[in-house]
Image (spheres, rainbow, N blue to C red):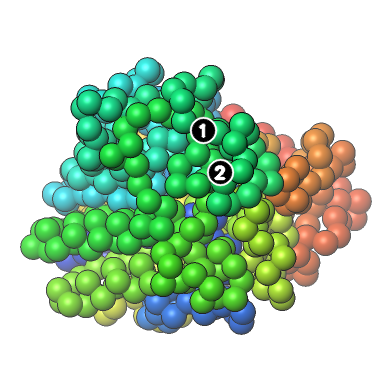
């Protein structure tokens, strides 16, 4: 329960901050683990620009994505609702329909209502359109219909077709004489595929990803036409960075919200040649260096425009790390002593802490004092917390799982959530430092990725204070606690309780 002083802060402090109307820059990395940045102690790789955010702001050690895979965690981040509450929020194909209802009170819609200009740059992966997409006309509804005023995105991920940029409602650079078509059920057109023409690949496959070949890399899904619009993988990071800094340039005289969703270090990892070989860890490590460079370019833009003190910068990741995720790029072989998930067990796809406990830094010079925070927080809390930052109240039904943790995000309070649902197909539950993974079938490890999933026939209870690596279940010694946590998880699962 919050103290009277915190209540007074929330009431009085929020109004003051609303008057300041800070810009908000949310940088979301893709598949970046807790241990992948040197701010958390990584030694094999250095991330000085990301570290700068941590050094000049709040370094959070218990910050979470709401799910251990990308589409559901991104859905929760923008809506303030756990993705398990809504069907169809699993990992989407590149031609999926939009899964956020147009007109919904989302994070960008909240900022729009507060008078902000809002932009999204980078990976979207939340669907577009209403069904059968005509990529050669207006592609909508999409980001503009859920609260963004500007949009420059990829539809899904780099390993899925279509491999094109979309600016607002249209594919960028499309030649009308060469219409773009996409199909996830059957092969279309005459483009070679990884399955039929492996000799054409410049990046080998470890599993799946054997459909249409683009730039020597085969993808998930089939595509034909639209060649003038196809991206070059090595340029993705540079182009998204250019678009992000361009948005800041255009919006510098107004309060703005920018959601910058980087693609690094998601597969396929083919960073710009200037980063190739620089990490000593192969393409995955090089992609992390490219991400760090991008962060530096964006921070430098804020500095140059005199916006640093007026801008809250949040840096985090959509889920935990994965090494081999479909392509043979030596991520496993060249890892060495590097621990992508840091001290946590598991990674992407996992119910263990490494699945959702991710890098989490918040910087606002002059407002947030540099410090470490152990507060339990989640990206699902951005909606309620940033609404409080701008002096707004969520309408009925909006952000059902989002909690106003603004004092924690500002470093004014050590208190965060008392409980949290972690999602990876099945659900796990945090209650303070206790972690429960209910019993469930399935393999112990993910096929191909070799990530520990957390499946076990018996309930697993961990005391993270004594056992942060979740190495030994203490269910037998704490049967009553395990039972009460399981009952509480079922209650939260069946009915959201916004606080």
Reply above or below: 446 against 94.
below
Q: Secondary structure at mark 2?
A: helix
| Tag 2 and tag 1, C-beta contact below 8 Å | yes
Percent x, y of residue 228: 28, 39
Tell me the number on the disc at residue 200. Answer: 2
Q: Secondary structure at mark 1?
A: loop
Q: Residue furthest front?
A: 199
Relative to 484, 409 lies left or right = left
Relative to 178, 113 lies left or right = left
> Can residue 406 be seen from the camera position used here?
no
Name the image quarter holding residue 240. Answer: bottom left
Question: How many other residues sit within 10 Å of disc 1, few (<14), some (14-19) or many (≥20)?
Answer: many
Reply above or below: 147 against 4.
above
- Number of callouts: 2
> Can residue 328 be seen from the camera position used here?
yes
Tell me the number on the disc at residue 498. Answer: none
Reply above or below: 451 against 172.
below
Report the Cα–Cα distance between label 2 and label 1.
8 Å
Q: Mark 1 sits on what residue?
A: 192
Percent x, y of residue 378: 50, 54
Residue drawn at 30 percent across, 21 percent down: 134
Relative to 218, 148 lies left or right = left
Percent x, y of residue 203: 58, 51
Residue drawn at 29 percent across, 40 percent down: 229
Who comes first in sequence, dot 2 or dot 1? 1
Percent x, y of residue 70: 51, 45
- Residue placed most toward the observer, 85 or 225: 225
């Amino acid at each position: 329960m919050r103290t009277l002083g915190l209540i007074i802060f929330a009431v009085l402090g929020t109004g003051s901050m609303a008057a300041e109307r800070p810009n908000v820059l949310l940088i979301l990395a893709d598949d970046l683990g807790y241990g992948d940045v040197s701010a958390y102690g990584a030694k094999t790789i250095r991330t000085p620009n990301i570290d700068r955010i941590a050094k000049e702001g709040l370094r959070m050690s218990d910050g979470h994505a709401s799910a251990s895979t990308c589409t559901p965690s991104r859905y929760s981040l923008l809506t303030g609702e756990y993705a398990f509450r809504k069907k169809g929020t699993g990992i989407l194909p590149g031609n999926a329909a939009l899964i956020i209802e147009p007109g919904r009170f989302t994070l960008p819609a909240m900022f729009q209502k507060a008078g902000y200009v809002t932009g999204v740059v980078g990976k979207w992966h939340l669907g577009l359109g209403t069904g059968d997409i005509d990529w050669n006309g207006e592609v909508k509804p999409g980001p503009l219909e859920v609260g963004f005023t500007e949009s420059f995105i990829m539809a899904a991920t780099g390993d899925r077709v279509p491999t094109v940029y979309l600016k607002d409602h249209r594919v960028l650079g499309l030649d009308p004489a060469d219409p773009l078509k996409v199909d996830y059920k059957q092969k279309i057109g005459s483009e070679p595929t990884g399955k039929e023409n492996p000799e054409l690949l410049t990046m080998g496959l470890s599993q799946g990803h054997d459909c249409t070949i683009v730039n020597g890399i085969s993808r998930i899904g089939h595509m034909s036409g639209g060649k003038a619009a196809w991206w070059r993988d090595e340029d993705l990071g540079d182009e998204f960075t250019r678009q992000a800094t361009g948005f800041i340039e255009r919006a510098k005289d107004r309060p703005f919200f920018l959601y910058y969703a980087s693609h690094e270090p998601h597969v396929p990892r083919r960073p710009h040649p200037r980063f190739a070989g620089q990490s000593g860890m192969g393409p995955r490590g090089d992609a992390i260096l490219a991400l760090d460079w991008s962060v530096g370019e964006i921070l430098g833009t804020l500095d140059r425009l005199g916006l640093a003190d007026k801008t809250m910068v949040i840096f985090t990741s959509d889920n935990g790390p994965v090494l081999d995720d479909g392509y043979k790029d030596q991520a496993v072989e060249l890892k060495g002593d590097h621990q992508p998930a840091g001290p946590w067990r598991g990674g992407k796809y996992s119910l263990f802490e490494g699945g959702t406990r991710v890098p989490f830094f918040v910087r606002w010079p002059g407002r947030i004092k540099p410090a470490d925070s152990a507060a339990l927080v989640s990206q699902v809390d951005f909606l309620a917390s940033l609404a409080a930052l701008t002096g707004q109240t969520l309408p009925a039904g909006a952000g059902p799982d989002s909690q106003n943790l603004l004092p924690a995000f500002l470093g004014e309070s050590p208190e965060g959530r008392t409980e949290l649902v972690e999602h990876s197909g099945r659900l796990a539950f945090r209650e303070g430092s206790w972690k429960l993974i209910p019993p469930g079938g399935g393999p112990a490890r993910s096929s191909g990725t070799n990530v520990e999933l957390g499946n076990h026939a018996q309930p697993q209870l961990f005391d993270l204070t004594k056992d942060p690596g979740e190495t030994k279940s203490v269910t037998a010694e704490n049967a009553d606690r395990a039972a009460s946590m399981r009952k509480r998880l079922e209650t939260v699962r069946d009915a959201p309780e916004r606080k």
